[in-house]
Amino acid sequence: MTNLSKIPIYYSSILIILTATFVEAKPFESTYEPLPSENILISNANIYDGEGNEFLSTDLLIQDRKIVAIGEDLPINNTFKVIDATGKWITPGIIDIHSHMGVYPAPGVSTSSDGNEATSPVTADVWAEHSIWVQDPQYALALKGGITAFHILPGSANLIGGRGVTVKNIQRNTIDSMKFPDAPHSLKMACGENPKRVYGNRQQAPSTRMGNAAGYRKAWIEAEAYLSRLDEYEAKSEEAKEIGYKPQRNLEQDTLAGVLRGEILVHNHCYRAEEMATMINIANEFNYKITAFHHGVEAYKIADLLAENGICGALWADWWGFKHEAYDMVQANIAILDQALNGKGCAIVHSDDAIGIQHLNQEASKALAAGLRAGFNITKARAMNWITSNPAKAAGIYDQTGSLKVGKNADVVIWSKNPFSVYALVEKVFIDGATAYDRESNFEPASDFDVGIISPNKNRIEE
Amino acid sequence: MIYSRNIALIIFMLSTAVVNSESVLIQDITILDGKNNEPFVGNVLIDDNKISQVSTSSLRGDLVINGTGKILTPGIISTDTEIGIVEIGALSVTRDDSSNLYQIGFSIYDAFNPNSVLIPWNRSNGITSTLTLPQNTNSPIGGLGSFFVLDSSLEISGSKDVVMIGRVGGSGSKSRAETFAIIEDLLEFASSIDSSDMKTYKDIAEIIDGSPIAETMDLHPRDLKALHKLVNDELPLIIKANRASDLLKLIKLKEEYDLNLIIMGAQEAGLVASRIAESKIPLIINPINNIPESFDELGANIELAGKLEDLGITLMFNAPRDHNYHLIRQGAGVAVANGMSYAGALKALTLSPVEVFKLGNRGQIAPGKIADLIIWDADPLEPSSMPEKVFINGEDIDLTSRMSRLTERYTKNKEKPNGYRN
């Protein structure tokens, strides 16, 4: 089998198509349809392109839902709508790699608290997408913060918590119609205090960090066996297949085997440095790749190790102290990882929070400022990658979005001011070239939950 | 030997005395005074622990700090924290914010830890003092918060039991109508007691025995004393409440019992804003929180702060509890981005808590005020800005924190094993 772990993750969605031969049908396929769109010229804008570049007073051309050009004096005809963005800033659509919207929706009530299947430490069989409440009013709030796509994960109660899903920030009434087309599935794993607390309190394994490690390894040993039975069957001739039994499908092992085959991306909740290093050892033992460590409050202590292994850190700018494994916070964490091995680090600013997701630009701004104070030389244009192209890579959707590259989806945000300022407001959001939010004309989605819930003839936050 | 050591000590004491008496002049700095005034470039003189002069004309000082291009504000006062009483949220052995026995009279004052790592961290983010509040007790009103100056002195500087807290709203265990009834009964009970009957511990115990509500709630003399202070001494009462109907009921309670009431949370205040304005009840809100997190908070709105300010409502800010108190400044910036005035947002962080909770002679840059001051490298409401200097009680505070030490450990001297770095 080809070792997929060395191949950049953004090719993985293509590889899925090539390698996923044993799965007969793909259930729960995306049925996403974009909103109606126009061809648009955004003129005279200042641009952070999500590839580390800054362009001042430049035009951006959107045609047939794609970015077709960035430059000056771009040719258009009279079918193009022209938006004068003089003095404004443009970025790619912001992407949050760690969200629980939909699975922990608002209001946070027990009846829709669906993010942790905390009934067994390994629940690789559950899929976050099957918990999503499509009427969560938080999506629209995130949209006004420029979020065009986000990755929804199960919680961290379990060692292996189940599959995550990447969605477009579009209010729809089925889950499949929100799903990001061709985005790879992900697997949520969790280190540290949470699993050992949840299960230790019930007098069952794991109750220690060594119990955690044993739990992952046992799961991977079973997955290896399952995968070899599958491979053995796949290798048989058509005649032999007809007389032999096909190994019975197992939902849990489907997911784990998907990781071992490099089709499913591992997103690993992990705070402490030595635990991240242990998880890297386990990944090497079973020959799978960790795409990103999430939260990673101590990522700065092993930044070079993460960079060497091509593992992203999805981190907060400055959250800390709520538990012991989050005690060693430094504000330069994101910058230190970004600069590891002379800038080879993959740093991501994540939210894990329905308020934070609305202000990821401010979180990036704090992280950048801390990096500059720590003596690093990082541009704003590069820091913009932390909330655009880097999370897109970690979600496996970089071939489609995450930067303003010609040919990519026109997921674009227009900001009133430089987005590294707290005073910058999102003015317009385009998803696949379609206007999803427009501050000027009060064009914004409302979930069914918002309708008439305070006053019968108004939406929830309508004037 | 002993003699010479004493001489050394005396010399040391003299030298520190000299340092303390040196005046500090912060020169040519943009001053945001905390009081709603327009920013201006001027000079501020610190003498001892006080601001002695603020002027646009030149002043003389022993030690001169050039503030050109920088911004001076009063120190930020955080109005709703657990600073000093919780070290690590999920570690109960480091939590001193709740009581098993006392309810209304539970005070956290004696638990305050001036050596908490949260103190240097918050100081380095511009927070110079805090109103530290306990967790809610079983009683809907009760638990006493104290005011602490974050100077790290082991001799606590602050004021004990300056505020009582409370909470009403959806709870999952009982009707909010019961909550209001308990509050009314407690207030009725406390109002009916004559101070002269409360002289001895035995007196108080007898009063409790004779009251159905006090007995049912298992109140202790400590609780009754606090309740008595609430109804007789204008002790500020912060009630956490969000739903519009709850806010209206609280306005009635304030009027009926003449309470010094402050409402915290107030997510639906926008729905009853003019009534709140008439009531003159100050609010503590988290301006960045627009999540309808419960059925009490459906009206949550990012534009709340600006709308309330327009009606003249006194505002203060909080940030999520559990260590993220420094985000109060980001919240203020978001309030301004969404319609609040800049001066109003700064006042909410500085002078308003002083005026509402009577926290002494601070919170403003004016002659005679205590010199709790921050020199910022840039706009203080930009979360990317940080203090360059912090003065508490006129003293130039070292801004080293555990975080700055760890940052240094992993960015400098990397050739050494990490255990042998700074």
Image (spheres, grey):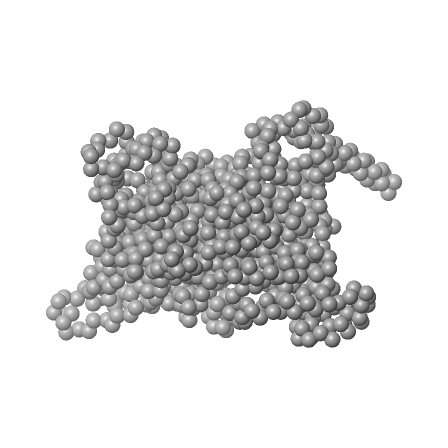
* Residue B265 appearing in the image: yes
Seen at 58% across and 27% down, the residue is B68
Q: What is the residue that sits farthest to the left in this orientation?
A: A239
In the rendered image, the vertical position of residue A449 relative to residue A66, given as above or below? below
Seen at 42% across and 71% down, the residue is A119
Image location (x, y in percent) of residue B243: 51, 60
In the rendered image, the vertical position of residue B122 relative to residue A59, given as above or below? below
Image location (x, y in percent) of residue B3: 87, 40
Q: How many marks?
A: 0
Depth check, front residue: B294 or B417: B294
Depth check, front residue: A136 or B403: A136
* Residue A409 appearing in the image: no
Image location (x, y in percent) of residue B338: 46, 44
Seen at 66% across and 55% down, the residue is B260
Q: What is the residue that sits farthest to the top in this orientation?
A: B58
Seen at 35% across and 64% down, the residue is A131
Depth check, front residue: B193 or A244: B193
Residue B126 appears left or right of A238:
right
Image location (x, y in percent) of residue B101: 67, 69
Q: Quadrant of residue B104?
A: bottom right
If the image is split into quadrants, where does the N terminus of chain A sit? Answer: bottom left
Depth check, front residue: A19 or B203: B203
